[in-house]
Image (cartoon, rainbow, N blue to C red):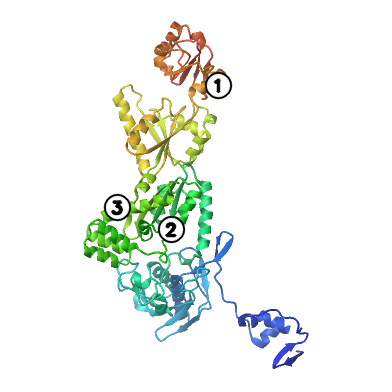
Amino acid sequence: MRGSWYNDCYYPAGYRWDHVSGVLTPDAAFAPDNIRALYALSEAQYTALFGQTKPQKPTFEHYVRSGQKLLRCGYTTGTCAALGAAGAARLLLTGREPETVALRTPKGIVVEVAPIYCRSTDTGAACAIRKDGGDDVDVTTGLPVIASVALRPELAGEVRIHGGEGVGRVTKPGLDQPVGEAAINHVPRAMIKEALEKEAESAGYAGGFDVTISIEGGAETAKRTFNPHMGVEGGLSVLGTSGIVEPMSQQAILDTIQLEMGQAALRAGSPRRLILAPGNYGLDYLAQNMPELADISIVKISNFIGDALDMAAAEHFEEVLLVGHAGKLVKLAGGIMNTHSRTADCRTELLCAHAALCGASRDVCAALMNAATTDACMEILDGAEMREPVLASLLDAIQLHLDRRAAGAFRVGAVLFSNQYGPLGQTRTAKELRIGTFYGVSVGPGDPELMTLQAVRRLENCPVIAAPQTPKGGMLALDIAKGAVELSGKTILPLRFAMSLDPAVQKAAHIEAARAVKEYLDAGQDVAMLNLGDVSLYATFGYLQEILEAEGCKTVMLPGVTSFCAAAARLGQSLTGGMEQPLTIAPGRCAAEVLAAPGAKVLMKSGRQLPETLAALADAGLLSRSAMVCNCGLPNEEVWPDLTGYDLARSAGYFATILVKEG
């Protein structure tokens, strides 16, 4: 090679002294590509001089979008522990030091990393994995998580997990692990066990393992966390429910919440409803315990409850339900709208204060103040038989502060739960919001094209569709609605009403129908009852509405096209002239009573009393001024512009509407 030496440095031929590529880190300066370019070496020449290039270590490249930014995710201490256990076991079972180890996290994302080291020890093998927090850098980022593994052939598939140096011990009840155990949570334990089982299966090993997880520098680092206050002493916790650390930049989270809130607003029906959940626990609880709310948009809001409520107001939501773990939401009782522990951690103080208000003894209050978690507080309250009154007091305070933040922009309530105790309670407004709404939906006289856009949208968004059913099984209102709306996948609730003039029989049928509807409303599902014509006019909905409103249910009426308006349009005639001309609307059986009234008349559902109605019209000299439309808008529609020559032997059917012009 041709070149020259200067000040003990070699410069290749053609080196330009006036050309500087830039300042490089040592790793970049001595990278193979840079050396080859600097000395104009071919691949073969470089290999002959320096040996085969080692493969690059894998880097974890998984990103989440926040607004216009891409933020890199990291992996939890639990993932590090499981990867380390897999690496150490592989060395023991195969005799080969792995260059990389990989696993699929509970979130479904694969993490592959190169160990810091993987080596044999006096008792087995140890593998160290460096914690990577991605763009969510915390005090654990960069710490080596070490898994020391020993083979235990006599354990037959059993995995025993221990905490070593730098891993804390649980000192207070109510945490994920019992008092005295290493603070390695149940999900990381399951990940470690699964990783070792896969290595054993791959190597044909049927025995068990002893695993000790350590964190280098964990004891010192733990002093800068809330672990001592929470009841974890001597080191860090090995955590993670998903195995992945998603970036938690405050502005990034707020941007994401704002984006998702806007998308939820676009999907919102009427009323505009929204569910807010601080984190994964809330999402899991909703999926498992509140499936009736599956059609409502959910936005994950982390600790930013106040900001999320403000955004919901800006997006004009009408009803907002907050569902979260009591450990976070109990802070709302003190008006704290950012629930991160760095902002405020007064869970036990609030529980203690409300317990004192409810008459708790000094010993109970002291125990609450010293409890590590809200679950531990529940155990104390149960022992004192005070859980119910204390939670009721807390929930009232939470409702008060939520209402103050919403400032009348929407109705808002909260549902609290615990992973250990399940549902803990809901605020007053939450209970009201979770009761479904009973809608009376008008489908018009028969032609699906006469259904209103409002009716169509309500049926599209309603999970339960109720419709009257005849003794023979016919559901005319449902058939009409199906002509305008796709109803497959919805629950169809037939309502059977007695065709009797006996008020007691009618009332019993109405009560039974209301009971059937209320079962769905109490489960949090909206019910839309289909009504022929307009829901405000001679509609059975009114009877059910009265019963259900008396029981505290919310009802809404959606208007529609009446049969007599459709009949008038079919006949091509106006019902009235100027504003001075009155219009009388009555059932056909009341014809004799209303024909003497001034102005035009509408006689509805006249089919059963048609002979009597025609006789009354004849006596009043109004047959020539009367017209009738039967089954308006239906395939068997009949139109009679003049009733003078109507054959009384001809059946008109139940849905016969007679229009009488003013004489």
Rendered position, 87 above or below 271: below
Tell me the tag on residue 569.
Answer: 1
Q: Nearer the viewer, residue 228 or 607?
A: 228
Q: Are marks 1 and 3 in contact (CB under 8 Å)?
A: no
**Label 2, residues with CA under 10 Å away: few <14, some 14-19, many ≥20:** many
Residue underneath mark 2: 278
**Residue 602, label in figure:** none
Please name the residue shown 42% across and 52% down the image.
405
- Toward the bottom, the furthest residue is 8
Q: State the CA–CA distance, disc 1 to disc 3.
A: 58 Å
State the SS at label 3. helix
Label 3: few (<14), some or many (≥20) within 10 Å?
A: some
Residue 392 in percent (x, y) is at 29, 52
Count of all numbered marks drawn on residues in the image: 3
Q: Name the quadrant containing residue 64.
A: bottom right
Q: Residue at x 36, y 44 (%)?
A: 432
Q: Amino acid at mark 2?
A: Pro
**Front in this rendered view, residue 435 or 333:** 333
Q: Position of residue 295 (x, y in %)?
A: 46, 47
Q: Quadrant of the N terminus?
A: bottom right
Instruction: Judge by depth and name the residue closer to the eye, 126 or 542.
Output: 542
Q: Residues within 10 Å of mark 1 (few under 14, many from 20)?
A: few
Q: Is residue 264 left or right of residue 342?
A: right
Q: CA distance from mark 3 to mark 2?
A: 22 Å
Q: Nearer the viewer, residue 388 or 394?
A: 394
The alpha-carbon separation of the residues under discs 2 and 1 comes to: 55 Å
